[in-house]
Image (cartoon, coloured by chain):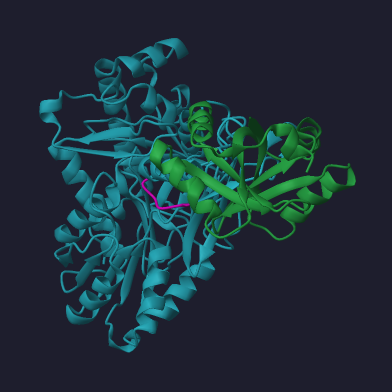
Chain colours: A cyan, B green
Amino acid sequence: MIWDKEHECMPRNKLEELQLERLKWTVARTYDRVPFYRGKMDEAGVRPADIQSLKDITKLPFTLKDDMRANYPYGLFAVPLKDVVRIHSSSGTTGKPTVVGYTKNDLELWAEVCARFISAAGVTSDDIAQVAFGYGLFTGGFGLHYGLEKVGASVIPAAAGNTPRHLMIMQDFGSTVLICTPSYALYLGEAAKEAGIADKIKLKTGLFGAEPWTQQMKLEIEQKLGLTATDNYGLSEIIGPGISGECIESQVGMHISEDYFFVEVIDPDTLQPVAPGEKGELVITALTKEAVPAIRYRTRDITRLIPEPCICGRTTTRMEKVHGRTDDMLIIRGVNVFPSQIESVLLEVEGTEPHYLLVLYKEGVMDCLEVQVEVSEQIFSDKMKELRQLEETIKTRLQNVLGLSIRLKLVEPRTIARSEGKAKRIIDMRSDGGTQ
Amino acid sequence: MKVKQLSIFLENQSGRLAEVTGALGTQGINIRALSLADTSGFGILRLIVNDITKAREILHEKGFTVRETDVIAVEIPDSPGGLAKVLKALSETGFNVEYMYAFVQKSKENAVVIFRIESIDEAIKALQSKGVKILSAQEVYSF
C-alpha cells in the first residue's frame, strides 16, 4: 500500500519544485540560526540567495561526522532546547558520540517517513509487529515504533536481546512482522528451528535495517523465518530509519522519501557528482528538519541510485542496498564501531601507542569482534593477577565505549603484521554483511 | 641475596615454549629453574638462567616481551616438612607470596624454592632472622 500517494507518486517536476522550495527554506534558516554552518558557507563564499536551482546545492560545503563531534553536544542545533522534545545519539569516531535532537514536528516527520516504508513493505493495521531493535539512544527502536503505530499495527516493544522471550512472544502473540537487524533475524530463525517452533510462527514480513546485508542473506532469512525480508535505510545524523525502504512489489532498491531528503551521489575522492546510476558515496540534505538541520551530510555509505520508474507506481528514486563504506567504520550486530574508538581506549589504558588488531568473525550467524592487543613491556607483568586485571580492564572499557560485547585477546608483540610502517588493523572474516 | 628472574609473555599456542627454550639452548643458555602460569589464552613463563643479560638479549631479538624481576631462592632440606617450615616463617612475618616454584638440586640433598614477594629486602631480613637459608644469586646461577 502507498501511504502518501500524493507525495510518493508525485510527478518528478512537481517533486523537484517542492524540493527546491524546501531547500531554499532550510539553507536560509540554517544560515541564520547555526553559526557553524554560517561560518562554513561564508568561507565557501556562498549565500542562501545563491540557491536558485537544485543544481546549486553543489555550491554548499559538505558536512562531516567530525563536524558533529566538534560541535558536541548541541552546537548544530537550530532551535532552543525548550523546543527539543527528544534527544538521540550515535557512536562517534572517537570518544564522544554525536547528538541529535528532534522538535515535535521532527518527530511527526520521522513517524511519517517510517510509516511510508513500513506500508511499502506491505504492513497494515491488521499486523502485529514485534520490535527487536534496541530502545534507547539508538534511533532504530523508537523510529520504527512510532512509524508502526502511525500505520496502526499492534506494536510489541519487545526490544533487543533475550532470544527465548522473543521466540515465546512470536509464538504466543502471533506476531506477523519482525523488526530487527538482518543478522539477528538470521539468529532468531536458527533459534526457532532449534526450539522446534519454526512451523508455529506466523511472521509474514520482516523490516530489517541498521546494517548492510546481501541478497544471499535475504534468501536465507526468508527461508528460515518464512517471511518476506525487506530492507530499509537511515542514519541518526539525518533522522534515523525512514530515509528509504523497499516496496514489496519490486524488492529492488529502497524508495527515498525525496520530498524530505535530497540525495546526491559523489565520488569520495574528487567530491564531484558521479554520472547518474553510478556507484559512489551517498550525500543527504534534510529538507524540512527543524532541530538539527543536515546540509550535504556525507554518509560514508556507498550505494547507487536507480532512476528508472518502479513497478509499484511510486515516482521516487530508489537507492541500492548499501555496498560498503568510504571510511573505516565497521557495523557489528547493528552497532557502529570505529577503530579510532578502540585506539583511544587502549591509549588511555596503556599510555602509549597501542598495537592492536580487530578480527571480525561469525559465531553461527552472529557477528563477533575479537580485539587482539599486543602485550608490550610497559604493560607486561610477571604476576598473573595483574595481567588478568589488565585484560579485564581493557575489555570492560572497550565494551562500555562500544556498547557491544567483545572478545579480548592478549597477544605477543609483532603477532600483528605491520605493512609499510602502517599496521593492518582489521581482518574481516565474515563472508557476508561485512563492509570492509 | 636477590636472584634475577626473567618472565616472558607467551600466547597459549603449541610450539611457543619450545621456541623460547630452543633459542636459549642453541646459544648456550642453561635454564636453572622454570615455571609456567597460564590461562586459556596466554601464559607467563618464568625462568632462572645462568646468564640473564645474554638470555634477555636473545629473547628480545626474537621479539618476545620480557621482564626482569627480583626473587628470593630459599634452600630447604629435601625432607618432609621442609617447605612448611619456611612458609610458616613467611606467614609469621606477614609477607604475601605472589607465587613460588621449587626444584631439586642435582648434587645436594636440598631443594630450592623460588619466591616472588613484594617487599623483597624486608622479607629477606625477616627470613634470615628466622634462620631460613637464602641462596646468593651466584649460588643459584651456577648449580
Q: Tell me which corner region of the image, top left, top right, bottom left or bottom right, holds residue A123.
A: bottom left
Of residues B45 and B15, the one drawn nearer to the viewer in this rendering? B45
Of residues A291 and A158, the one drawn nearer to the viewer in this rendering? A158
Q: Tell me which corner region of the image, top left, top right, bottom left or bottom right, holds residue B92.
A: top left
In the rendered image, the vertical position of residue B74 relative to residue A221, given as above or below: above
The span picked out in magenta is: A403-407
Q: Main secondary structure of the magenta part?
A: loop
Question: What x and y, as percent, mark residue A295?
Answer: 37, 29
Whether residue A54 is visible: yes
Question: What x and y, as percent, mark residue B130?
Answer: 49, 36
Residue at the spot 85% in from the left edge and 47% down from the top edge: B25
Whether residue A427 is visible: no
Q: Is residue B97 left or right of residue A210?
A: right
Residue at the spot 67% in from the left edge and 58% down from the top edge: B13
Q: Is residue A383 left or right of residue A241?
A: right
Residue A405 is inside the magenta segment:
yes
Q: Is residue A109 left or right of residue B17?
A: left
Residue A228 is inside the magenta segment:
no
Q: Is residue A123 left or right of residue A57?
A: left
Of residues A136 and A120, the one drawn nearer to the viewer in this rendering? A136
